[in-house]
Image: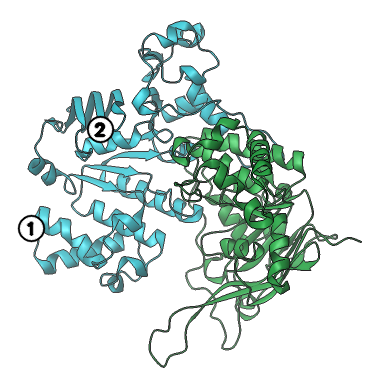
Chain colours: A green, B cyan
């Protein structure tokens, strides 16, 4: 059996903060606390969660821009973080990234040709003729004409800039594109164009997407599978159809309840507030991270952290909640 | 009764490197105390320029024509001193990005106390006590401790609560909120919107909410103005606008918005082309280049608002005969 395109095993990343006093131990931020998933070629995995949940740390580790504190990122079976530098550089062909802000991610002093072909020069040392030809091809794929090559980023609108950023990611013919909030800086009408383009490109080139977004509706539409991160851990995983319509984790429910709907006048009552006093965490125990925000929390949640467990055979839907069955059974308005 | 805010044919011309740009081309609306009105549109449509014009904060070289009457007083001709007396006093503003709206070098308490001391002449001690009350009112946990905290010690949602506390400090009659939740997580967005709605209802002030998000509009405002290319292309009660979608641009915005429940691989309806540059707006309907129902007449002159229902109008020549006759 061939290895999956991307396999992430028990990924942990702790950042050390500056110490507050000279002799104090330096405080740590636990950005990721053991995240595992697989992504097959040509599929899309969505990652959702609030800021600080570890979404962007995950992206940086998958892109091998930083090393994990523990755990592995395997691309077609190769552990990226154990590769020698030359081999890692060769592997970078297969993975590219699209960033959130198309104003910050393109160098204003470089022409589009220079920006789009940079991965080719760095990774392959490709000649000028090949660069020109490949650049024309990828710009065509994202719907821009060859006249764009000689222009500078300021001559383009936000949506066009994001197309250029996508072209830059495509030029190495990658198998995986990590897209960190690729449309959240764009206007609604332009966002739709870029989302359609990304879906077309996925079909055309058999790309896999690791699609990071805070917009649940976007993830619902473009992803085959979704993981929900909360404080560095996966709290729920499943196909969007299941996860967004029969969510099993109270956090996923809270996220869904907060999405504004297109029904005027329907001021939904604020989601039920958690019990005034969450159960106290016994000394030495590490309870559920969502404890203080959860209205289902009881003594067991304070005592033992719920592991991510399958809710149905086949591992298609999993949640890290002691009360997952009860939560799933509750009606949900979408 | 004099409306709290009456904007009539507001026109703003900005001075840009590419020559004069008509940023607003005749915006009119009224707002009573207790009303909630939303301005929705994409970047460059003029919604933020409208807010800045109301506050007298337009960039240098901007020319303003038309009238902005606030409680019967004309604002567009007021001098800077008189505007200063209003801003932060009877008109409060919530900005989009709470990190840049707050001064990183001053404590939270001092920043909330500033308008109280300036506008109400409170003593330092009285202003501090009032600041504490305001922080409790915006439901900031551990308000007393936070008075001496700096902005960097707080999360985005907490900072936005502080910005709201500052805007409310002097009990304004009008609250202008420019994309107050765009920089926040969806769960925090819900809390902040609920808080704003609650405070507006309690104090009976007028709210002008600016947003690009249809969902935020639907849940927060009674009336909405859809802006495009420096004009209001459709305006009416929120429920009616959502039901009728009279203007082709309003319709396009709705169709382009991803919604929960769309199956995997759904292609969104897009609006072809791009938002026009303010510096070279066409003489006619600004949406003409992207509109599927365009006819020659659309390009000749900016269409006048056509009533499509009670208090509901759209600037479009191609409204169905049926729609126009229902007015």
Which structural element holds mark 1? loop
Q: Give the mark nearest the N terminus, 1 or 2.
A: 2
Task: Judge by depth and name the residue closer to the eye, B301 or A167.
Answer: A167
Where, by quadrant of the figure, is residue A60 drawn?
Answer: bottom right
The vertical placement of A324 against A179, above or below, is: below
Task: Judge by depth and name the residue closer to the eye, A22 or A301.
Answer: A22
Count of picture labels? 2
Where, by quadrant of the figure, is residue B144 drawn?
Answer: bottom left
Q: Residues within 10 Å of mark 2 (few under 14, many from 20)?
A: many
Chain that bears disc 2:
B
Task: Judge by depth and name the residue closer to the eye, B191 or A231.
Answer: A231
Which structural element holds mark 2? loop
Seen from this angle, which residue lies furthest bottom? A23
Task: Determine if residue A200 is in view.
Answer: yes
Q: Position of residue A168 (x, y in %)?
A: 61, 46
Q: Position of residue A38 (x, y in %)?
A: 76, 61
Left or right placement of residue B81 versus residue B254 in this view: left
Where, by quadrant of the figure, is residue B51 drawn?
Answer: top left
Chain that bears disc 1:
B
The vertical placement of A277 against B325, above or below, is: below
Task: Judge by depth and name the residue closer to the eye, A261 or B39.
Answer: B39
Q: Residues within 10 Å of mark 1 (few under 14, many from 20)?
A: few
According to the picture, the residue beneath numbered tag 2 turns out to be B32
- The mark found on residue A268 in the picture is none
Q: Position of residue B20 (x, y in %)?
A: 27, 26
According to the picture, the residue beneath numbered tag 1 turns out to be B121
Residue at 50 percent across and 55 percent down: it is B187
Q: Position of residue B139 (x, y in %)?
A: 35, 61
């Amino acid at each position: 059996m061939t290895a999956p395109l991307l396999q992430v095993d028990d990924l942990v990343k702790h950042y050390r903060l500056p110490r507050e006093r000279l002799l104090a131990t330096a405080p740590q931020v636990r950005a990721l606390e053991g995240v595992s998933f697989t992504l097959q070629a040509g599929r899309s995995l969505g990652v959702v969660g609030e800021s600080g949940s570890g979404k962007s740390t995950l992206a940086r580790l998958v892109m091998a821009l930083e090393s994990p504190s523990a755990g592995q990122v395997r691309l077609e079976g190769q552990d990226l973080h154990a590769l020698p530098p030359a081999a890692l550089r060769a592997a970078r062909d297969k993975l590219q990234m699209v960033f959130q802000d198309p104003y910050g991610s393109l160098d204003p002093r470089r022409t589009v040709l220079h920006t789009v072909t940079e991965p080719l020069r760095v990774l392959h040392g490709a000649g000028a003729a090949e660069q020109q030809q490949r650049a024309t091809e990828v710009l065509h794929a994202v719907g821009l004409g060859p006249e764009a090559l000689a222009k500078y980023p300021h001559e383009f609108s936000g949506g066009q800039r994001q197309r250029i950023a996508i072209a830059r990611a495509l030029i190495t013919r990658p198998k995986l594109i990590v897209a960190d909030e690729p449309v959240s800086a764009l206007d609604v009408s332009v966002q739709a164009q870029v989302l359609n383009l990304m879906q077309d490109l996925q079909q055309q080139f058999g790309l896999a997407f690791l699609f990071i977004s805070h917009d649940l509706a976007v993830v619902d539409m473009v992803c085959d599978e979704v993981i929900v991160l909360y404080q560095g851990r996966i709290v729920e995983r499943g196909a969007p159809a299941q996860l967004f319509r029969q969510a099993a984790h109270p956090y996923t429910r809270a996220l869904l309840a907060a999405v504004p709907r297109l029904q005027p006048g329907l001021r939904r009552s604020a989601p039920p507030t958690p019990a005034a006093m969450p159960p106290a965490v016994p000394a030495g125990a590490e309870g559920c991270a969502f404890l203080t925000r959860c209205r289902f929390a009881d003594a067991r949640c304070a005592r033992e952290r719920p592991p991510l467990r399958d809710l149905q055979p086949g591992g298609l839907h999993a949640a890290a909640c002691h009360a997952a069955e009860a939560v799933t059974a509750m009606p949900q308005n979408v | 009764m004099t409306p709290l805010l009456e904007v009539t044919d507001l026109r703003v011309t900005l001075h840009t490197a590419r020559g004069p740009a008509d940023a607003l081309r005749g915006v009119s609306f009224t707002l009573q105390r207790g009303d909630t009105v939303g301005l929705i549109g994409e970047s460059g449509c003029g919604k933020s320029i409208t807010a800045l014009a109301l506050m007298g904060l337009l960039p240098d070289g901007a020319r303003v024509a038309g009238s902005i009457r606030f409680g019967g007083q004309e604002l567009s001709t007021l001098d800077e001193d008189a505007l200063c007396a209003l801003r932060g006093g009877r008109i409060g503003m919530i900005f989009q990005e709470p990190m840049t709206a707050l001064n990183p070098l001053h404590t939270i308490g001092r920043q909330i106390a500033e308008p109280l001391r300036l506008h109400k002449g409170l003593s330092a001690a009285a202003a501090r006590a009032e600041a504490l009350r305001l922080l409790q009112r915006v439901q900031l946990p551990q308000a007393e401790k936070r008075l001496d905290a700096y902005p960097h010690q707080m999360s985005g949602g907490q900072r936005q609560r502080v910005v709201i506390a500052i805007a409310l400090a002097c009990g304004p009659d009008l609250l202008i909120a420019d994309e107050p939740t765009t920089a926040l997580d969806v769960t925090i967005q819900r809390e902040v919107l609920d808080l704003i709605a609650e405070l507006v209802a309690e104090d009976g002030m007028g709210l002008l909410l600016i947003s690009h998000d249809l969902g935020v509009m639907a849940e927060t405002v009674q009336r909405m103005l859809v802006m495009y290319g420096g004009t209001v292309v459709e305006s009416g009660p929120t429920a009616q606008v959502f039901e009728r979608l009279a203007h082709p641009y309003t319709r396009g915005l709705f169709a382009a918005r991803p919604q929960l429940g769309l199956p995997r691989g759904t292609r969104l309806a897009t609006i072809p082309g791009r938002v026009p540059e303010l510096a070279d707006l066409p003489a006619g309907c600004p949406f003409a280049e992207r509109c599927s129902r365009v006819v020659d007449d659309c390009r000749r002159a900016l269409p006048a608002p056509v009533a499509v229902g009670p208090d509901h109008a759209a600037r479009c020549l191609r409204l169905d005969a049926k729609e126009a006759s229902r007015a």
